[in-house]
Image (spheres, rainbow, N blue to C red):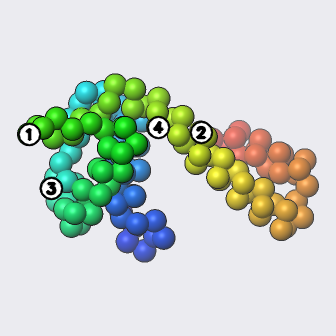
């Protein structure tokens, strides 16, 4: 992954989202060790404190846990937690934005549903 320094999303949040995506893709697994803030800093050429903030976000969301002196690890049900959070929060937020834009453009509910179905069929 390449971090986007021009994005409105702060780098530490991009790091947290990248780690979540790694968990969803089964590249980081339950009770598996996660990259340290120094490894992440080297991988992405960023300040270790920035990488640490990304790890802290996942620690606070109970996606990761610390083992003193050993590092951070993925919690047992991390994948389920991430899926639930993204479905209830992220997906809802995206849909709200799409619906608002559709209203501004005078797109009917039927047209919007048709568009969603077309996009689903493509992917």
Residue that numbered label 2 is attached to: 87
Q: Quadrant of residue 35?
A: top left
Q: Nearer the viewer, residue 22 or 121?
A: 22
Number of numbered discs overlaid on the protein picture: 4
Distance Cα–Cα, label 2 vs label 3? 31 Å
Q: Is residue 80 above or below residue 36?
A: above
Q: Nearer the viewer, mark 1 or mark 2?
A: 1
Distance Cα–Cα, label 1 vs label 3? 15 Å
Residue that numbered label 3 is attached to: 38
Query: Dot 4: within a 10 Å radius of its alpha carbon, few (fewer than 14), some, or many (20 or more) residues?
Result: many
Give the farthest residue toward the left.
69
Which label's residue is closer to the chain start, 1 or 3? 3
Distance Cα–Cα, label 1 vs label 2? 34 Å
Which label's residue is closer to the chain start, 4 or 1? 1
Q: Nearer the viewer, residue 67 or 15?
A: 67
Q: Nearer the viewer, residue 69 or 26?
A: 69
Distance Cα–Cα, label 2 vs label 4? 8 Å
Q: Secondary structure at mark 1?
A: loop
Q: Position of residue 18 (x, y in %)?
A: 37, 50
Q: Nearer the viewer, mark 4 or mark 1?
A: 1
Q: Can see residue 72?
A: yes
Point out which mark residue 82 bears: 4
Q: Position of residue 64 (x, y in %)?
A: 30, 38
Q: Position of residue 48 (x, y in %)?
A: 19, 62
Q: Is residue 80 above or below residue 9?
A: above
């Amino acid at each position: 992954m390449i971090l986007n320094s021009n994005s409105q999303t702060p780098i530490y949040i991009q790091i947290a989202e990248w780690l979540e995506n790694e968990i969803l893709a089964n590249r980081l697994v339950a009770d598996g060790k996660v990259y340290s803030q120094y490894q992440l800093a080297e991988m992405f050429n960023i300040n270790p404190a920035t990488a640490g903030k990304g790890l802290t976000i996942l620690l606070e969301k109970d996606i990761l846990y610390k083992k003193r002196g050993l590092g951070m690890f993925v919690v047992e049900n991390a994948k389920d937690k991430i899926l639930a959070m993204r479905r209830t929060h992220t997906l809802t937020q995206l849909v709200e934005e799409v619906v608002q834009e559709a209203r501004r453009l005078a797109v009917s509910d039927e047209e919007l549903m048709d568009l969603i179905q077309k996009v689903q069929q493509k992917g």
